[in-house]
Image (cartoon, helix red, strand yellow):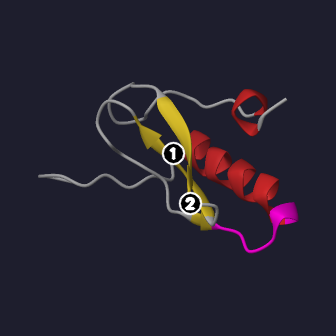
Amino acid sequence: MSLHEELSLHDCPYCGGAGLLEEEQGWCWYVMCMDCGAQTAQIAYKRPEERGEAASTAARLWNFGKIMRSGIGD
Protein backbone atom coordinates (compact mmCIF):
# COMPACT_ATOMS: atom_id res chain seq x y z
CA MET A 1 0.00 0.00 0.00
CA SER A 2 1.37 3.44 -0.90
CA LEU A 3 1.62 6.37 1.50
CA HIS A 4 -1.09 8.16 -0.47
CA GLU A 5 -3.49 5.28 0.26
CA GLU A 6 -2.47 4.91 3.91
CA LEU A 7 -2.88 8.54 4.94
CA SER A 8 -6.29 10.18 5.22
CA LEU A 9 -6.60 13.93 4.57
CA HIS A 10 -9.40 16.24 5.72
CA ASP A 11 -10.86 18.89 3.45
CA CYS A 12 -9.13 22.28 3.30
CA PRO A 13 -10.04 24.44 6.32
CA TYR A 14 -10.09 27.56 4.12
CA CYS A 15 -12.20 26.52 1.16
CA GLY A 16 -13.29 22.91 1.71
CA GLY A 17 -11.29 21.66 -1.29
CA ALA A 18 -9.44 18.37 -1.48
CA GLY A 19 -5.93 18.10 -0.05
CA LEU A 20 -3.19 16.40 -2.05
CA LEU A 21 -0.09 14.84 -0.47
CA GLU A 22 2.92 15.82 -2.59
CA GLU A 23 6.56 14.73 -2.50
CA GLU A 24 9.12 17.29 -3.65
CA GLN A 25 11.98 15.64 -5.59
CA GLY A 26 12.76 13.04 -2.94
CA TRP A 27 13.58 15.37 -0.03
CA CYS A 28 10.29 16.53 1.53
CA TRP A 29 6.52 16.12 1.74
CA TYR A 30 3.73 18.70 2.01
CA VAL A 31 -0.04 18.78 1.55
CA MET A 32 -1.63 21.30 -0.80
CA CYS A 33 -5.26 22.22 -1.48
CA MET A 34 -6.15 21.47 -5.06
CA ASP A 35 -8.62 24.39 -5.12
CA CYS A 36 -7.14 27.38 -3.26
CA GLY A 37 -3.45 26.44 -3.02
CA ALA A 38 -3.18 26.53 0.78
CA GLN A 39 -0.44 24.19 1.99
CA THR A 40 1.49 22.86 4.95
CA ALA A 41 5.14 23.54 5.60
CA GLN A 42 7.57 21.26 3.77
CA ILE A 43 8.54 18.34 5.99
CA ALA A 44 12.09 17.33 5.04
CA TYR A 45 13.69 13.92 5.34
CA LYS A 46 17.28 12.84 4.72
CA ARG A 47 17.16 9.04 4.71
CA PRO A 48 14.70 6.71 2.96
CA GLU A 49 13.62 5.25 6.29
CA GLU A 50 12.44 8.75 7.37
CA ARG A 51 10.23 9.17 4.29
CA GLY A 52 7.07 7.64 5.75
CA GLU A 53 7.29 9.61 9.00
CA ALA A 54 7.73 12.88 7.06
CA ALA A 55 4.62 12.12 4.98
CA SER A 56 2.66 11.28 8.15
CA THR A 57 3.76 14.55 9.75
CA ALA A 58 2.65 16.57 6.71
CA ALA A 59 -0.74 14.82 6.75
CA ARG A 60 -1.11 15.38 10.50
CA LEU A 61 -0.33 19.11 10.13
CA TRP A 62 -2.93 19.40 7.37
CA ASN A 63 -5.57 17.57 9.39
CA PHE A 64 -4.90 19.82 12.43
CA GLY A 65 -5.32 22.90 10.24
CA LYS A 66 -1.68 24.02 10.51
CA ILE A 67 -1.47 25.40 7.00
CA MET A 68 -0.29 28.49 5.15
CA ARG A 69 -2.18 30.36 2.51
CA SER A 70 -0.69 32.88 0.16
CA GLY A 71 -2.98 35.53 -1.19
CA ILE A 72 -4.64 38.85 -0.51
CA GLY A 73 -6.06 39.13 3.00
CA ASP A 74 -4.30 36.09 4.43
* Three-letter residue code for mark 2: Gln
Q: Say which residue appears at 46% left-offset and 26% top-offset.
A: 18
Residue 59 at what x, y percent from top left? 64, 44
Question: In front here: 37 or 45?
Answer: 45
The residues colored magenta run: 44-49
Q: Which residue is mark 1?
A: 65
How far separated are the C-alphas under marks 1 and 2?
25 Å
Q: Secondary structure at mark 2?
A: loop
* 10 Å crowding of disc 1: few (<14), some (14-19), many (20+): some
Q: Say which residue appears at 50% left-offset and 62% top-offset.
A: 41
Q: Which residue is mark 2?
A: 25
Which of the two marks, 1 or 2, is nearer to us in this view?
Answer: 2
Do the residues bearing badges 1 and 2 touch, measured as CB atoms within 8 Å? Answer: no
Q: Is residue 71 above or below residue 34?
A: below
Residue 36 at what x, y percent from top left? 28, 36
Q: Is residue 74 left or right of residue 57?
A: left
The N terminus sits in image quarter: top right
Toward the left, the furthest residue is: 72
Q: Is residue 1 left or right of residue 70?
A: right
Q: Is residue 35 above or below residue 71?
A: above
